[in-house]
Image (spheres, grey):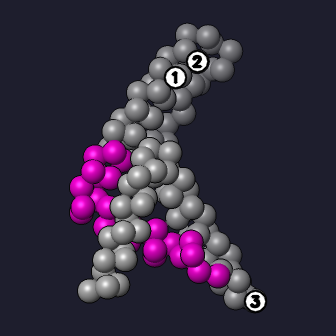
Amino acid sequence: MINNKPLVRDSADEKQVKDATARKKLQDDQDDKDLKFLLNTPQGLRVLWGLIAKCGIYEPSFTGGSETFYKEGKRAIGLELRKEILACDPDAYIKMINILNKKKDS
């Protein structure tokens, strides 16, 4: 979830830090549950694979010009998404690859 609010206003306040740590843990747990939900549906697998593909993580990003920076930014997002998927459920990534292979065979 995107939240731009600071978790702590005073890092010297132990209670604020403790509360922020607990809130962060809850949010991380919810993010993991949400991703696992998506990874357990064929629709979620297809959408996530489509996003990864659009990010161009398996394509060269060097263009010789400033477009390289744009492509590297997209690629960084795709790599982060792939890392989160692999951390959440490595088998799901394999399922996505299998779905892609089935599409190619069709």
Q: Nearer the viewer, residue 52 or 27?
A: 52
Residue shown at 57%/75% (left/top)?
58
Residue shown at 31%/77% (left/top)?
102
Query: Which amino acid lies under the numbered mark 1 shown in the image of this protein?
Result: Ala
Report, in whole angstroms, how far the alpha carbon at label 2 lies from the one at label 3.
46 Å
Query: Which amino acid lies under the numbered mark 2 shown in the image of this protein?
Result: Val
Residue shown at 64%/82% (left/top)?
60
Residue furthest toward the bottom? Answer: 64
Report the predominant secondary structure element of the magenta stretch: helix
On the picture, is 101 further left or further right than 53?
A: left
Report, in whole angstroms, how far the alpha carbon at label 3 lies from the one at label 1.
44 Å
Where's residue 36, x and y in %?
34, 45
Q: Which residue is mark 2?
A: 17
Residue mark closest to the camera, 3 vs 1: 3
Q: Which residues are magenta?
A: 35-60
Q: Which residue is mark 1?
A: 20
Query: Which amino acid lies under the numbered mark 3 shown in the image of this protein?
Result: Gly
Where's residue 47, x and y in %?
32, 66
Vertical relation: 45 (above or below) 104: above
> If you read the primary sequence from the N terminus, does the residue marked by circle 2 or circle 3 appear first?
2
Circle 3: element type? loop
